[in-house]
C-alpha cells in the first residue's frame, strides 16, 4: 500500500472526489471512495473534514497576506482536494480497512522514532560490531514490547486515568509464586504472593488473568462504596469491563514509595 499525490491525474480519471461513504469508528469525520483500476489495483480516497477546513482557512489567509483577489472558481477547484489522502493497494479491501492499515504506519513510525532517539551505541564501549548488533537488537525487542503494551493498555482504556509509568509500577508490584500452574491465572487463587486488588483489576482489564467472579465483584463494589462513605473518596477499585481508574490502594502504595 502506497500513498498517491492528491494532484495526480488519477483523481479526475476515477472521480476520486465524488465520495460515496463515511468511515465509522475512526473518531473523525472522514469521507471515502473506492475505485478499481484497469491493472487490477485499487484506489481509496479519503477526505478528513477537519483537515479540509484547516486547509481552506490557510488558503484564504494566504490570499490575504499576498494581497491576491479571491476567485470562487479557483477556490472551488482547489477545495475539492483539501484534506484529501489517496492510497493505492494491490489488495481488495474496504475503505475502512485501508484507512486503519495506513493509520497504523504512524504508530510504527513513532516506535522507530522513539527507538532511534534511545540508541546510545556511539557512547557505549563495545568491542566489535557484533556486540553493537546484539545490544541494539535487544533494545529494539524491548521497544517493540513496550509499544505493544501501550497499545493493549490504550485499547483497554487504562491510560485515560493513569500514566503508562503508573501502570507499569502497579503491574511490577504483582508477584506469583513459582509453584503456580502454567495456565491463565485466576483472580483470587492461592498463588498470588503480592498483588493488590487494584493491580489484579488492571491485569483483568488487560485480559492477562481471569476476571473476578460475580460474587467477588459484588463484594468489592460494596467495600468500595463503604470506603467512599467513610473517606469521601470518589475513586474506587475498578472491575473488569468498566473504564478502569486507579484504585485507592494503588494510590497509597505509590505515595508510600514516593516518600
Image (spheres, rainbow, N blue to C red):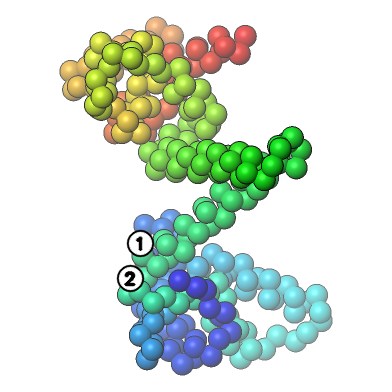
Quadrant (top left/top right/bottom left/bottom right) for the N terminus? bottom left
Q: In this rendering, is residue 145 above or below 113?
A: above
Q: Give me the disc on residue 120.
A: none
Residue 48 falls left or right of residue 92? right
Q: Is residue 201 visible?
A: yes
Q: Nearer the viewer, residue 201 or 135?
A: 135
Q: Sequence order check: which comes first, mark 2 or mark 1?
A: 1
Measuring from the top left, give residue 218's x and y in whole percent: 22, 18
Quadrant (top left/top right/bottom left/bottom right) for the C terminus? top right
Measuring from the top left, give residue 49's x and y in whole percent: 51, 68
Residue occupying image coordinates x 45% and y 77%: 88
Measuring from the top left, give residue 143's x and y in whole percent: 54, 41
* Kind of element beneath mark 1: loop
Residue occupying image coordinates x 47% and y 57%: 104
Looking at the rendering, which quadrant does residue 212 occupy? top left
What whole-number distance in Å separates the C-alpha atoms at marks 2 and 1? 12 Å
Q: In this rendering, which labeled residue sits more in front, label 2 or label 1?
A: 2
* Kind of element beneath mark 2: loop
Looking at the rendering, which quadrant does residue 60 occupy? bottom right
Q: In this rendering, is residue 238 above or below 114?
A: above
Q: Nearer the viewer, residue 8 or 145?
A: 145
Residue occupying image coordinates x 63% and y 71%: 55
Residue bearing the label numbered 1: 24
Q: In this rendering, is residue 84 above or below 76?
A: above
Residue bearing the label numbered 2: 94
Residue 99 falls left or right of residue 132? left
Q: In this rendering, is residue 55 above or below 230?
A: below
Residue 53 falls left or right of residue 16? right
Amino acid at each position: 500500500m502506497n500513498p498517491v499525490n492528491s494532484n495526480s491525474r488519477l483523481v479526475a480519471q476515477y472521480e476520486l472526489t465524488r465520495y460515496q461513504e463515511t468511515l465509522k469508528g475512526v473518531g473523525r469525520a472522514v469521507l471515502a471512495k473506492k475505485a478499481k483500476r484497469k491493472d487490477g489495483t485499487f484506489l481509496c480516497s479519503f477526505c478528513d473534514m477537519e483537515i479540509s477546513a484547516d486547509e481552506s482557512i490557510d488558503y484564504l489567509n494566504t490570499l490575504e497576506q499576498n494581497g491576491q483577489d479571491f476567485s470562487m472558481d479557483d477556490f472551488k477547484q482547489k477545495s475539492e482536494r483539501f484534506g484529501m489522502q489517496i492510497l493505492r493497494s494491490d489488495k481488495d479491501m474496504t475503505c475502512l480497512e485501508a484507512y486503519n492499515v495506513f493509520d497504523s504506519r504512524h504508530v510504527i513510525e513513532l516506535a522507530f522514532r522513539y527507538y532511534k532517539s534511545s540508541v546510545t551505541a556511539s557512547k557505549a564501549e563495545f568491542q566489535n560490531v557484533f556486540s553493537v548488533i546484539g545490544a541494539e537488537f535487544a533494545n529494539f525487542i524491548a521497544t517493540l514490547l513496550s509499544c505493544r503494551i501501550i497499545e493493549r493498555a490504550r485499547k483497554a482504556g487504562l491510560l485515560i486515568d493513569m500514566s503508562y509509568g503508573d501502570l507499569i509500577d502497579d503491574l511490577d508490584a504483582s508477584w506469583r509464586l513459582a509453584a503456580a500452574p502454567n495456565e491463565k491465572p485466576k483472580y483470587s487463587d492461592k498463588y498470588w504472593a503480592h498483588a493488590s486488588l487494584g493491580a489484579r483489576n488492571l491485569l483483568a482489564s488487560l485480559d492477562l488473568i481471569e476476571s473476578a467472579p460475580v460474587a467477588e465483584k459484588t463484594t468489592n463494589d460494596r467495600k468500595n462504596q463503604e470506603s467512599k462513605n467513610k473517606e469521601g473518596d470518589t475513586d474506587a477499585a475498578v472491575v473488569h469491563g468498566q473504564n478502569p481508574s486507579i484504585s485507592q490502594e494503588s494510590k497509597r502504595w505509590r505515595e508510600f514509595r514516593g516518600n
